[in-house]
Amino acid sequence: MTARKAPDLTNYFSAAKQSQQLSEAEEEIQRLKAEIEELRSSGSTELEAQLQALRSQLQSQTGILSIPVDQVEPNPEQPRQTFLPESIESMSRSLAADGQLQPIILIQRENLVLFDGERRWRSALALGWQNLQAVIIPEPVSLHRKALLTSLHREDLNPLDKAEAIVRELAINTDLSQVDIPRVLSTVVRRLNAQKRMNSVVELMTVTADEQQQGLAALDLSEKEQAVLGLLLDLQLNPASIDANVFPMLSLAEDLKVAIRSGLKGVHAMALQKLSAKNLGVTESSAQSIRVKTTQKVMTETLSASATRKLVGEVIASHEKPSSTSTTKTKPVSQEARRLQKLSLESLKKAERNQLMEFQEVLRQKLAEIEEVLKQK
C-alpha cells in the first residue's frame, strides 16, 4: 500500500497574485495548483507550520494589506462555530500587548471573507481597532471542504462543531440528508463490527484514494454506505470513531449543545445527556431544569469526566421512586384479587350455606377496611 504524502499548503496557495489591488490586476490569477486535501494526513502542529509557510509566501507575493475590520465578513461555511469569550479575551490581550504578529487570510468575493484568522478579527473588533493586516487569495473551489480541512485536525475544534461540519460536507457530496448520514454510518459500522471487518476499513485511512475505493468495494456495501465511508476516509477520519464519539453530539439536548459552545467537553455532555425525562421520571421541562443545574455545577467546579458520571448517577438515584417497596406492598393485594376472580359461580353453588355466609362476612369486613384505606389516600 502506498502511503499518502504530507500536506503542502504552500502549493495550494501559490497562485495568490502579486498585487494589492486584485480587481485591477493585469494578469489573471492562476488556478490553484495543488488540492488542499493533502492536509488529510496533517496533525495540528504540522498544520500550523504549513499555515505559517503559506503566510510567508503570500506576503512575499502580494504584500500585506491594511484592511478596515468593518469590511471583513466571517466565512458562513466556517466549520468552527464556537469562539469562547476567554479565547477572544486572551487573543485581545495578545494583540493589545504585542500587536498583530500574523496577517489574517481573506478570500476575494464581492466582499472580503475570512479564510483564516477569525479569532484575531473578533478580537480586533472587541478592541475597537480600525484596521487589520491581511493577505488576499482567490476563492477556492469547494470552500467548505477547504475550510473543513484547515480546521479539522486542530485540537481545539469542539466535537459539536466538528460533527456539524462533517455532516454538512457529506451532505454536500452525497444525495443523503444531514439527518440520514449518522444513521447510515451507525448501521454500517455496527454490521462491519459484527462481521469483524471494521479494522479493514480503518486500515484504509493510510492508503491511496484508489486503494480505498478497492478496499470498500470488497466489503459488500450499499451505494450510500460506500459513499459515506469513502468520504470520511478521504478526510482522513476513522469512521468508527466518528460514529462513537462525534456524531452522538448531534443528538444532544439543545441545552447541552449550548453548553458545549460555552466550553463543556463532549465526554461530559454525553454523561449529562443521561439526565433525561425518562431516566429521572419527570417531565421534559423538569428534566431540562435539572440538567442545566447539573451542567452548571460540572462547569463551575471543572469536574472530571469520571466525577461527572458519578454526579449524574447520584442525581438519577435521588429521583428514583421507591418502586420496589411499593411493589412489595401491593403485590399480595393483586394476587388475592386475581384469586377472587378465579372463584367461579359453579364453585359457589357447590359450597354449603354456612360456608357462603362466613365468606360473605369476611368480604364485608374487607370491603369496609378497603373503604377506610381509600379515604386516607
Image (tube, rainbow, N blue to C red):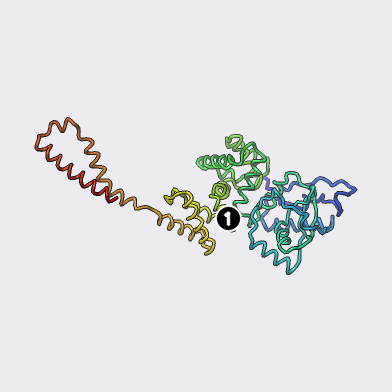
* Above or below, comparing residue 358 to residue 292 in the picture: above
Q: Which of the pair 85/16 is nearer the observer?
A: 85
In the shown orientation, is residue 18 left or right of residue 124?
Answer: right
Residue 242 x, y percent position in the rendering:
58, 48
Q: Residue at x 64, y 55 (%)?
A: 82
**Quadrant into which the N terminus falls:** top right
| SS assignment at label 1 | helix
Left or right of 126, for residue 14 = right
> Which residue is the site of mark 1?
260
Residue 168 seen anywhere in this rendered image of the structure: yes
- Looking at the image, can residue 274 be seen? no
Q: Name the residue nearer the viewer: 313 or 18.
A: 313
Residue at x-position 72% and y-position 52%: 74
- In the depicted structure, whether residue 171 falls above or below residue 96: above
Side of 307 relative to 160 (left or right): left
Q: Quadrant of residue 212?
A: top right
Nearer-the-camera pick, 359 or 220: 359
Given residues 244 and 249, the one toward you in this image is: 249
Residue at image x 73%, y 55%? 116
Crowding at mark 1 (Cα within 10 Å: few <14, some 14-19, many 20+): many
**Kind of residue indicated by mark 1:** Ile
Q: Position of residue 108 (x, y in %)?
A: 80, 49
Q: What residue is at 9 percent from the left and 37 percent from the top?
A: 354
Residue 234: % across, % down = 66, 44
The part of the image, by quadrant, that contains residue 127 is bottom right
